[in-house]
Amino acid sequence: MTTSDILTIINALFFILGGVVVFMVGMNMMGSNLEKAAGKGMRRLMTSATKNKALGITTGAAVTAIVNSSSATTVMIVGFVNVGIMTLTQAASIIMGANIGTTISAFIMALSSTGSALEISAIFALLAFCGMLVNMLAKTDRTKRIGNIFVGVGLIFIGLNVMSTAVNSLLDGDTAVSQAIQNLFISLGNGKDVLTWEVIVLFLLGAALTALLQSSAAITAICITLAVSGQVSTQMVMCIILGTNVGTCATSMLSSIGASTPAKRAAMIHLLFNIIGSLIFIWPVAFAGNYIAQALAWITPKVQWQIPIFHMFFNVVVTLILVGFTKYLVKLACLMIPEKKGKKPETAEEGEMVLDSRLLKTPAIAVGQARRELVKMGDLAFSNYKRAIDMLLEGDLSKEDDFRETEEKVTELKDYISTFLVKLSGQEISDTDEKKVGTFYNVATDMERIGAYAENITEFAQQMQSVEGEFSEHALDEIKETHSYICELYEVAEKAFMDRDTSLYDKVDAAESEVNRMNKVMHTAHLRRVSEGRCTADVGAIYLQLATTLERIGDHMVNIAYSLKSYT
């Protein structure tokens, strides 16, 4: 081999690697911007997925088609299971659908290999340029996303074209390089039936390369390029494709490290599904690969279309076969990853902090989960408020330990949510979600302040015991009435925030008006009791501070409800 041949190999290798990078950047750019554009739709899809297996499979296919990566979808699912948004059975059907949705990538690649007077890749390269112009001139985030989608699509085809050109440069002519490459592929079965050991080698090659690059799409793109050049047979590519389906599980398995047991089981279901599916197809491909190739050739003579057709057929058939065995896949995953000894089964309700970092891959879903965690924090803070009122009215401080424990949880949850919101705000999110995240910081602070005022009420209870004071019967009635309006206000404010329902504002305003009215009633009644000599100075001071505290708690509840105004 001459120096010129060595340089040809090095140059081609560099261009192939560069093409893979451009291709993957394009895939990520297109997928992430499509995902942002479909933020609300993504939430609706995930909600519908919980209804039945058919909807789960459809959801998995649709989401994967949007983000252009079954690995990305599965990582999301691992995150959803980890935080309790989905059950293992629901996750299994979505994972099956993801394998179908990922085949869209192969069809995009086949399109780039379609020959014409004006190359498809050239048209999409122009689309990338147009997308850049749209991005530069855009005045809204929505328009910028459209520009980025165009750029992403264009980069996909540019990357494929670079890889194709680099491969062709190695194979052109009767050089030592092209001859060596041809001999390599001939030894692996091109030009004759692929033997069993060669099937295994090609299968493992597809799995290993996909696990290394963490992208089955990139390996499929290279396979299509080699197949179009005639260097590999359709049967060989089928073996590699089966391997990529197993190799793509590496991403989800890695993402499950450190996650809950259910999340690890979700990743295991993904691996089991793809291994079993590959085993179902590996023998027909090994022993009847030529007949399958002939059937594909009958459908279309173009090999670049035969590969994605086989890819889709394989995933659809495997899904149809295994969907009826979903519960057995779940049971097998549970057997392979058992609960730790001495530990109760993990459920979403037991864990308080479920803002999994995997959710950041789908900001629209992450925003919804952050909202639920804020409501959970608010419920804890409000439960402490009610606990404090009980201690004050009953003169019994036996609940103080429970109060302190809940107070620590509220503080921890506030810090935890704030940290997650910082990470979320660092993602590329839509304008609306950005406004939501901004208001969530304030909502977390309002909820924390409710907890802080509850602590003040606990201190009032302690002071009442230290001065051996008691509220009069009228004062107790006034406190209880104000408390009832506070409870009503919190209930309606929480519902408005959680459901994003501004139609409840009238009820919020009405409840707040009652709280403010009772604040005046408490002050007026206190002055009357003082003038009549029916109230001591110590008890009176505590009573007035309590009246102000209750009003301020109400103000923070109103802030929580009205936080919706910035984005609804």
Image (tube, grey):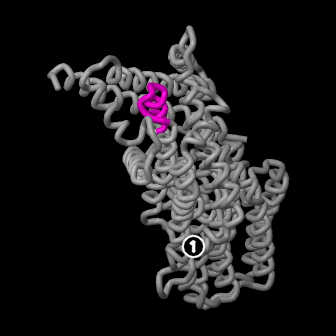
Q: Position of residue 566 (x, y in %)?
A: 67, 41
Q: Classify 151 as above or below 53.
A: above
Residue at 81% x, 57% y is 513
Image quadrant occupied by the N terminus:
top left
Q: Classify 174 as above or below 528.
A: above
Residue at 59% x, 91% y is 398
Q: Classify 111 as above or below 499.
A: above
Farthest residue in the left direction?
3
Name the residue tied to disc 1.
Answer: 332
Task: Using residue 313 as the reference point, say whether residue 133 is left or right of it.
Answer: left
Front residue of 198/317: it is: 198
Check if residue 228 falls in the magenta segment: yes
Q: Position of residue 318 (x, y in %)?
A: 64, 54
Q: Position of residue 213 (x, y in %)?
A: 39, 44
Q: Give the residues in magenta.
A: 220-233
Characterize the magenta stretch by its predominant secondary structure: helix
Which amino acid, by three-letter code, is at mark 1? Leu
Count of numbered marks = 1
Looking at the rendered structure, the secondary structure element under dot 1 is: helix
Residue at 70% x, 84% y is 393
Q: Position of residue 482 (x, y in %)?
A: 77, 70
Check if residue 299 falls in the magenta segment: no
Task: Using residue 266 as the reference point, say whether residue 207 is left or right of it.
Answer: left
Q: Classify 160 as above or below 357.
A: above
Residue 173 appears in the figure: yes
Residue at 71% x, 64% y is 324
Density class for disc 1 (Cα within 10 Å; few <14, some 14-19, many ≥20) is some
Task: Using residue 157 as the reference point, say whether residue 187 is left or right of it.
Answer: left
Image quadrant occupied by the C terminus:
top right
